[in-house]
Image (cartoon, helix red, strand yellow):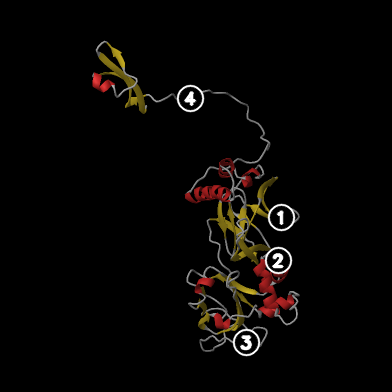
């Protein structure tokens, strides 16, 4: 039902004087007539629709042994975050030039789901220390401290033992699913994660990354338990006044470190706050020049290794020289974080003494890099990054 426009014809009588204004007027004796179209809105049926009716049908089947015949279907979307994820997947296809058909397929039957091996699936978060697991419909994220990596998984049954196998050959991680629903493992698990170090103009690869490799002890994991951050353990603190100093990197190595009662706040000066907002920050054991020397980088004449490496990373994270330097960062990194929107980063619990180096990089436009030495003391430590303590990379 609805409103439609209907056209009808009516006959109008004209006087001889009016008939002269209508070329299509018809004379019938002394009377002239003319036919005119008129339109009006009419409410009523506007078309037809097909109605499908259903009837109940019941059948009996013999239940037996079920064998896998294909990938598992997509699970039902259960919460607001999964709805946003589904919509975001479709928007990504559209932004990359996809059509409506491809967008709908990615939202309702994403390629990642099509590759799910048949078998039992798990859901939820499992923790019990620094190591934890976060299950998704197509993968499981292994979390160790601030390092995370998503990998495929499967549930395997052998006799009375149920095993969770994470990753692929040649070296998957095997954990046992216990009768009480917990997950049990032993030994040390290494998580080869990564962190965002910058952005690019490539819509296919919008970010650059650096390795973030962390190892944790695998123990018993229970559903819903918290995944905690590792806390450094070191000798007793050295009693010194609360201060922080900056200066040239004239000495290598660290003084003995200790835990408790120390914090570190890094703030960006107004002139560089916008450049550092959202960027990554690393606390290193040694001067960046020495780290890159250990990586085997060539200073190329009078240029410093830092300048050679920074220019390479400015060309892209896949540049061989950039990757060569990043490959050794995990051996020297003490902690990682990121600047907030105002250009501030905070470490609430750090070693109370020792010599470290803050490394930050704005990348791309107005490329600046900091490789600043800090001497941490017990208590509150603060330092400001500005254009005066940057490292020349031109």
Find out whether the residues at labels 1 and 4 contact each other: C-beta distance under 8 Å.
no
Pointer 4: what residue? 52
Cα–Cα gap, marks 2 and 4: 60 Å
Above or below 137: residue 246: below
- Say whether disc 3 or disc 1 marks the residue closer to the N-terminus: 1
Q: Is 360 left or right of 67, judged from the image as shown? A: left
Disc 2 secondary structure class: loop
Numbered label tally: 4
Cα–Cα gap, marks 4 and 3: 80 Å
Q: Residue at x 66, y 88 (%)?
A: 250
Foreground residue among 76 and 229: 76
Disc 3 secondary structure class: loop
Disc 4 secondary structure class: loop
Q: Residue at x 69, y 64 (%)?
A: 318
- Say whether disc 2 or disc 4 marks the residue closer to the N-terminus: 4
Q: Residues within 10 Å of mark 4 (few under 14, many from 20)?
A: few
- Say whether disc 1 or disc 4 marks the residue closer to the N-terminus: 4
The x and y percentages for residue 4 are 36, 27
Cα–Cα gap, marks 3 and 1: 46 Å
Pointer 2: what residue? 319
Q: Is 240 left or right of 293, judged from the image as shown? A: left
The x and y percentages for residue 173 are 69, 56
Which quarter of the picture shows residue 101?
top right
Residue found at the far top of this picture = 29
Q: Nearer the viewer, mark 2 or mark 4?
A: 2
Cα–Cα gap, marks 1 and 2: 30 Å
Q: Nearer the viewer, mark 1 or mark 4?
A: 4
Pointer 3: what residue? 248
């Amino acid at each position: 039902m609805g409103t439609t426009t209907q056209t009808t014809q009516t006959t109008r009588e004209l006087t001889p004087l009016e008939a002269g204004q209508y070329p299509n007027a018809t004379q019938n004796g002394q009377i002239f007539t003319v036919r005119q179209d008129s339109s009006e809105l009419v409410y009523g049926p506007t078309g037809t629709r097909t109605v499908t009716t259903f009837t109940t049908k019941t059948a009996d089947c013999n239940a037996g042994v079920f064998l896998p015949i294909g990938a598992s279907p997509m699970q039902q979307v259960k919460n607001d975050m999964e709805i946003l994820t589904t919509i975001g997947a479709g928007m990504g296809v559209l932004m990359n030039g996809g059509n409506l058909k491809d967008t709908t397929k990615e939202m309702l039957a994403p390629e990642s789901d099509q590759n799910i091996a048949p078998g039992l699936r798990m859901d939820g978060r499992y923790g019990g220390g620094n190591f934890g697991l976060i299950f998704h419909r197509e993968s499981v994220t292994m979390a160790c401290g601030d390092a995370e990596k998503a990998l495929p998984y499967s549930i395997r049954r052998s006799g009375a033992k149920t095993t969770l196998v994470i990753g692929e050959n040649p070296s998957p991680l095997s954990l046992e699913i216990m009768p009480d629903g917990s997950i049990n493992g032993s030994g040390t698990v290494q998580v080869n994660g990564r962190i965002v170090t910058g952005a690019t103009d490539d819509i296919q690869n919008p970010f650059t990354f650096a390795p973030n490799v962390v190892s944790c002890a695998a123990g018993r994991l229970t559903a819903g338990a918290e995944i905690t951050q590792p806390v450094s353990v070191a000798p007793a603190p050295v009693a010194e006044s609360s201060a922080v100093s900056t200066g040239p990197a004239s000495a290598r190595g660290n003084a003995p470190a200790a835990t408790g009662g120390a914090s570190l706040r890094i703030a960006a000066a107004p002139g560089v706050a916008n450049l550092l907002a959202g960027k990554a920050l690393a606390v290193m054991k040694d001067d960046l020049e020495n780290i890159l020397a250990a990586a085997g980088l060539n200073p190329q004449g009078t240029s410093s290794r830092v300048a050679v490496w920074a220019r390479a990373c400015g060309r892209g994270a896949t540049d061989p020289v950039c990757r060569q330097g990043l490959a050794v960062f995990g051996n020297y990194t003490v902690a990682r974080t990121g600047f907030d929107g105002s250009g501030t980063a905070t470490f609430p619990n750090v070693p109370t003494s020792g010599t470290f180096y803050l490394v930050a990089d704005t990348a791309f436009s107005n490329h600046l890099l900091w490789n600043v030495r800090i001497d941490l003391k017990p208590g509150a430590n603060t330092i400001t990054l500005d254009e005066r303590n940057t490292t020349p990379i031109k």
